[in-house]
Amino acid sequence: MWQAKLQRHRIEIVCAIAAIGYLVVFIGLPYANVFAFSFWEKDLYTLRPALSPENYARAFTNDLYRQVILNSAEVATIVTLVSSVLGYLLAYYLAVYAERWRNLLFFLLIVPLWTSFLLRAYIWKIILGRNGILNSALTQAGVLDQPASFLLYNKFSISIALIYIFLPFVALPVYAALEKIPRGYVEASADLGSPPWATFWHVVFPLTVPGLAAGAMVVFCLSFGDFITPSLLGGTGDIMIANVIIAQFGAAYDWPFGSALAILVLLIVMLLVGLSVWIGRTVSRGRA
Amino acid sequence: MSAGGGASRGARWTFAAAAILIFLFLYAPIAVLVAFSFQESQVLSWPIEAWSFRWYRLLLEDRELQQALWNSLMVASACVTVTTLAGVPLALALRRLRGRLGRFLEQTFLLPLIVPQFITGLALLIVLNRSDIGLSLWTVILGQSLVWMPIVVVQVHARLQRFDANLEQASMDLGANRLETFFLVMLPNLRTAVVGSALLVFTLSFDELPVTFFLTGAENTLPMHIWSMLRIGITPEINAIASLTVGASVGLILLGVWLLAKDRRRL
Amino acid sequence: MMDAVVRLDRVSKRFGSLVVLDDLSLEVRRGEFLTLLGESGCGKTTTLRIISGFEEPTDGAVYLNGRLVNAVPAYRRRVNTVFQNYALFPHMTVGENVEYGLRFDRVPRRERRRLAEEMLARVGLADKIDRQSTALSGGQMQRVALARALIKKPEVLLLDEPLSALDARLRKELQLELKRTQRETGITFVYVTHDQEEALVMSDRIAVMERGHIRQLGRPDDVFERPETLFVAEFVGASNKLDGRVVEIRHNSVIVALPSGDRLEAPTRSAGDLATGTDVRLIVRPEHLRVAADSSAATNVVRAVLEDIIYLGSDRKLTLRVGERLRIELQERGDRLPPCLGTRLGMTVDIEIPPDALYAFRKGRGE
């Protein structure tokens, strides 16, 4: 009986083995190694296998690391909120009002996605810098007496660059969600006497929440785990968690501690992914 | 969705104004960058007084940069090959798996795309280090392929979901075996997904830094080279590189859009 | 014994705990047009897929030309299918679609093209050979799907509701076309549909299916005029249902009393196990009822209130109420109805039910 079943499902079984094999070797194994390493110990210049919670204790008790994590969370939150609002506005304009401009504008929205992340962060260095274009323009216009230095190397410059980079990440899924809403829904709502804002709030917005949540989640995770922008545009006080981790794998040569911090970042990211999936599901089940 | 005739004029203009401002925010910096790439002076200053191709000429002479560019092209091409050859079969495998196992695998496949990339990079660094494998462009290719694999798998898998299973059955019904059916019926219909994700993987890989950062040996890719240039300080040469990459991306997207449109006309 | 192209022997199909086919046996005769008729979920499509090889039976044996084919994959069976939504390959032209199956019979390219042209000419689409398959109308797609399957010269052609996506007029036209094609080619057709009219028009034999069983297998007139079970009687053709109780047994018939007090005589036929006191359901088709001209003369008459007259072109349909809540329908050609019937709305009329048109079935028995 089970042999016949095996025979009938042999393709499924081969597929399952292939997929699971890939997952175990190329996804499970690397992350499991990070997890294992996070319990190792470091003696001066050698790493020693161990089962020590020391690294985690250090991450939680040392104020510096707590501050760095909070710092990263703060930047990521600001970036997520601002790009969500701006991205939503843009997507809404594209889907609802753009009409014959829609294709061109959509194209303009995805072009930045295909250009270098590194260079898009770098652009802000030449715009916000002491001799940057903004300062030049402001001094020439007489707004400033001398170039301002508060524009660059702080959380503001990091955030603005990240918003600049990640705005399309929200706009695209929201646009996709708006596109899919049949016009009949909006017309039915209006027909039933709903004013436009109520139609938006009760009909349109709930249908875009899964897309918005997914986009916001991606933006948060990517900002939270970014090390390029802070090291280009951040000051010494604005390092983010990714910079700290990378330092552990570089000059500090403390791989176990770096691994422990990486695991913490992973947990935070997973938590957020879970949350956004949950939001997406509840909203689409409850209201749509 | 689009606004009916009754949409209020005020709302329309408010949104249009917001959209214009946002697009300005997105494009003004690029315009500045391109403008600066043609500036004669070594020091960036506005307004630009003298224009020249000086920095572009410098690029032509920069051997290191050209080597890095070549390395990046090799890595990106290798990544496209690996992710396509492995990703399409993996997507086909995923399609066969239904129920809880299938859903679980599908979500786990996405992991490298969700996890911050530098963590995937350092995870692989640990594995390679423990198995005494030296770092080189090969390890970069391995790392990037792992990170971009979900893109191919997800895109192809999504297309497979929409693929009419009857077509597959019709083909087998007419005498084609599984392999013939795959090449004659499924692949032609998956083509846009495969080409689209390959294009995406190519550009993403070309631009990738966080994984490469951990996994590269002595050789540099283009982003790594730019990264080290940026650490030293701003040089207008970077503006020239950036302008060229923007131009190249626009060209690539236009090509992609054109291919897609051609494909749609056929369908 | 007739020559069976397909034989299903005690075939069952279960998906987990769901039983789709339950110990089903069926023989398809060579050259016939057999229709599997039933509502969605009755197992008709599963039966088709077991013949084509897309599903393996959980139990039982499938024979093609007397050879056991349980483990033979679809692409090695000389059986072809016309799919419900045609499943034309969207990336190929009409011609490429039609000649597709010949690739695997190692037919040279030029010969394939010639055969495709021939086959397309047969279905009246010779001029469309180089069109993209997605640029066709529904009816044209249906014809291409048919040509694509027929070019393989299958032993059996399976058709899974091939006309369901088309509008009524086109459907009628293609029904006749399919029937003609079947007769000309002599290929065995197994046709799946939920549309009983379609089944009656085209089939040599009809298998009425319900919940994984074949309830009746026979010629269209058998199924329509001599239903063997209550299900078949209710499913095939419009029918009036009159519930009552047996009050008297006669030689070849029973007398049934309705709740309204009317008594009707019905032949027993095969349902000979009706004892006095059994609850029965009487089935009678609307077109068999008649408005009685003279109530005293006829037997089997019920008194009914005329509620509505619906105009159907040459026919009229009368809605009538018998007793408190039983509603029945009567269909008759307009010129055969008594004149001035319209003035009798809301009044009682006598309805005559010829005993031969009545079918009595025991109620509440598991079918």
Image (cartoon, coloured by chain):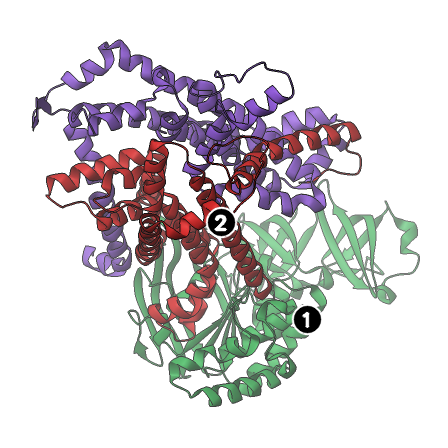
Chain colours: A purple, B red, C green
Q: Could you tell me which residue is drawn at 45 percent across and 75 percent down?
A: C80
Residue C172 place in picture, x, y as percent: 68, 71
Q: Secondary structure at mark 1?
A: helix
Residue B209 place in picture, x, y as percent: 33, 39
Residue B97 place in picture, x, y as percent: 33, 50
Q: Nearer the viewer, residue B94 or C85?
A: B94
Q: Secondary structure at mark 2?
A: helix
Q: Could you tell me which residue is drawn at 66 percent across and 44 percent down?
A: A102
Q: Which mark is residue B100?
A: none
Q: Nearer the viewer, residue C207 or A2?
A: A2
Q: Quadrant of the C terminus of chain B?
A: bottom right
Q: Could you tell me which residue is drawn at 64 percent across and 52 percent down?
A: C241
Q: Is residue B69 left or right of residue C313?
A: left
Is the residue at mark 1 from the same chain as the one at mark 2? no
Q: CA distance from mark 1 to mark 2?
A: 56 Å
Q: Residue A274's image quarter?
A: top left
Q: Is residue C243 left or right of residue C77?
A: right
Q: Which mark is residue B249?
A: 2
Q: Nearer the viewer, mark 1 or mark 2?
A: 2
Residue holding disc 1: C172
Residue C335 place in picture, x, y as percent: 87, 66
Query: Hey, what amino acid is under mark 2?
Result: Ser
Disc 2 sits on a residue from what chain?
Answer: B
Q: Nearer the viewer, residue C181 or B16?
A: B16
Residue neighbourhood size for the residue with mark 1, other residues' Cα within 10 Å, grouped as few (<14), some (14–19), many (≥20): some
